[in-house]
Image: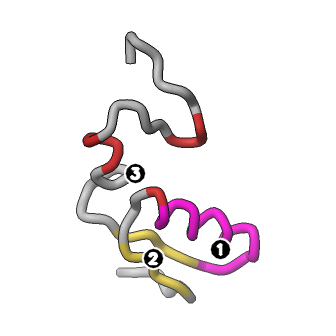
């Protein structure tokens, strides 16, 4: 069974996560859908320097 939500965000990349952040702040029921099993979409696996929540990349990962 799928729960009812008010908004569906397509894509769990940077923009989708940002949209989810603002929707949560507004108290909106939402779901983020992405082809990958984890958040961050393809950008987490493409660019080493990008990290969620602004954490800087370190040489040891």
The Cα atoms of the two marked residues, 1 and 3, are separated by 17 Å
The secondary element bearing badge 3 is classed as: loop
Do the residues under discs 2 and 1 have CB atoms within 8 angstroms? yes
- Give how far across and how far down residue 43 sits, in percent: 33, 48
Answer whether residue 20 is magenta in the image.
Answer: yes
- Mark before the other along the chain sequence, 1 or 3: 1
Do the residues under discs 1 and 3 have CB atoms within 8 angstroms? no
Q: Residue at x 47, y 37 (%)?
A: 51
Determine the main secondary structure of the stretch shown in magenta: helix
- Residue 16 in the figure: left or right of residue 46: right
Q: Which residue is mark 2?
A: 9
Q: Quadrant of residue 28?
A: bottom right
- Residue 55 in the figure: left or right of residue 22: left
Vertical position of residue 3 compared to residue 49: above or below: below
Q: Which numbered disc covers residue 23? A: 1
The Cα atoms of the two marked residues, 2 and 3, are separated by 13 Å
Q: Which residue is mark 3?
A: 40
Q: Quadrant of residue 59?
A: top left
How crowded is the residue under tag 2: few (<14 C-alpha within 10 Å), some, or many (20+)? some
The residue closer to the viewer here, 37 or 59, is: 59
Q: Which residues are magenta?
A: 15-29
Query: Tell me, what colour scheme is on the image?
Result: secondary structure
- Give how far across and how far down residue 48 sits, in percent: 34, 31
Q: Quadrant of the N terminus?
A: bottom left
Q: Residue at x 73, y 76 (%)?
A: 27
Q: Quadrant of the C terminus?
A: top left
The residue closer to the viewer here, 39 or 1, is: 39
Q: Residue at x 27, y 41 (%)?
A: 45
Vertical position of residue 16 compared to residue 2: above or below: above
- Mark before the other along the chain sequence, 2 or 1: 2
């Amino acid at each position: 069974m799928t729960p009812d939500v008010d908004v569906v965000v397509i894509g769990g990349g940077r923009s989708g996560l940002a949209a989810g952040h603002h929707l949560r702040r507004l108290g909106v029921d939402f779901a983020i859908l992405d082809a990958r099993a984890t958040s961050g979409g393809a950008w987490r696996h493409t660019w080493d320097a990008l990290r969620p929540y602004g954490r800087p990349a370190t040489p040891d990962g």
